[in-house]
Image: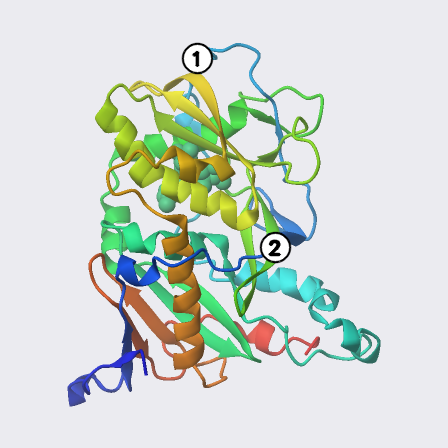
Amino acid sequence: SKYVKRPKVAENASSTSRSAFRFPVFTEQFDKPFPFFRKPSEVGSFSQDYKRQFHHDRHKLRIYVKPAVSDPCFDLSHGYSSLIRKDESEKEYLNDMLRWVMHNKEKFLLQSDRDKHSATGIKSLNTDFLCWRGLLTKLLCTPYENREDWMIAVTKFRGTYYLCEFDTESKKQQKEQTTPQQDEMCYGGWKFEQYVTADKEGDKPDTSSPVNNNEGFCSVVRTRLESHSLVYGGEVDAWDPAIRGDGKYLELKTSRIMQSHRQEQNFKRFKLIKWWAQSFLLGISKIVCGFRDDDGIVHSLQDYQTQQIPSMIKDLHNPWHPNVCFNFLEQFLGFLKHTVTDDDPQLVHLLTWKPRGDVQCQRLERGSEYTFIPRWFVDWEGW
Ligand code: A3P
Ligand code: MG
Ligand code: MG
């Protein structure tokens, strides 16, 4: 087998790790032609309201309002003290994705089964993987990531692999040690969204109401990466009436104004890879970035075409390669199919990765603290 089975772990650790496998991460191994990746197509969407409640509708999709002047002087700290904060202690798991699935049973029927089964239950979602887009962004960037580790729980249930991210110890520490300045920077990202979006066409941005980061709109897409079919959801910041045809969605970003070659290189190496991966996965064609100074004032806006980003970074010494990102993801998903074979909603395989290391895979005991498929989904009457 191409996957390495680790020597048996110490007996006292065996209650949590019955078996362990690892998946090596070297960029050379993934430097092959870009794998087949079908253009993601939207199969549905949902909204999250001011209290983070799920709604099976599009009412939280914002509309982009391009600023009329070239230097808009947006103050990203404005209203910071009135931020209505999402409760970070409330772990969301895959719950809203699962709720969306339960509203869209018919979208998972095979064409041939449509008439036969529509009145009764479905046996399977006929999809290999279901997760959030953010998790796939992390996986795509893994071959080039040198700071942040990750932890992913995998459960196979009715033939589908459900993937759910958990905070690592270092991520938990990072969250606890967030400085007031960092927190204000995070606020700035949401405030920028408020400055350049409105509720509906013809409206002006309302920049006096408090920012509430509970609110969001998610697009759910279906796609295929080689032999892997995937359904995932991700937040969409706005739609742009100026974009023609489909792919009207926009990603909004903020970033520090760049003043040196060094800053530009870092921007291309570390930021653009994440921006590219995040938007490419949902088929979002345009990213609008507000460039701010150290006082949090946005002085200019810049459009990036997602498709153009890989060619923009080619002048880097040792650039990142989109084909390496996608081959890594393709092989990683293959590794999961190979390693996780038991179909059981209570069983979790925990995958952990640290920069410069291999992916470690542990099979946990049934009903462990990482179990994330809720009873209401297992007991869904749609099955
Ligand atoms: P910026 O990235 O523009 O600063 P997104 O860009 O993915 O739509 O996220 C919107 C904003 O949410 C970000 O704006 C940032 O302020 C905040 N944000 C994104 N990811 C975050 C994270 N991992 N932790 C804290 N805040 C985050
Ligand atoms: Mg967003
Ligand atoms: Mg954004």
Outermost residue toward the front in this view = 33
Q: Earlier in the sequence, mark 2 or mark 1?
A: 1
> Please, what is the three-letter code of the amino acid marked with disc 1?
Cys
Q: Are marks 2 and 1 in contact (CB under 8 Å)?
A: no
Q: Quadrant of the C terminus?
A: bottom right
Outermost residue toward the bottom in this view = 11
Q: Is residue 347 above or below residue 37?
A: below
Q: Quadrant of the N terminus?
A: bottom left
> Please, what is the three-letter code of the amino acid marked with disc 2?
Val
Q: Quadrant of residue 189?
A: top left
Looking at the image, which residue is at 45% across and 55% down? 34
Looking at the image, which residue is at 37% across and 65% down? 152
SS at mark 1? loop
Percent x, y for residue 206?
Answer: 58, 22
Q: Which residue is mark 2?
A: 221
Looking at the image, which residue is at 49% across and 11% down? 70
Percent x, y for residue 324?
Answer: 36, 55
| Front in this rendered view, residue 153 or 35 | 35
For the residue carrying disc 1, how many other residues have a C-alpha within 10 Å: few (<14), some (14-19), or many (20+)? some
Lateral position of residue 177 relative to residue 49, left or right: left
Percent x, y for residue 166?
Answer: 36, 61
Percent x, y for residue 195?
Answer: 52, 22
Q: Which residue is mark 1?
A: 73
Lateral position of residue 184 relative to residue 170, left or right: right
Lateral position of residue 300 relative to residue 111, left or right: left
Could one spot residue 90 in this view of the protein? Answer: no
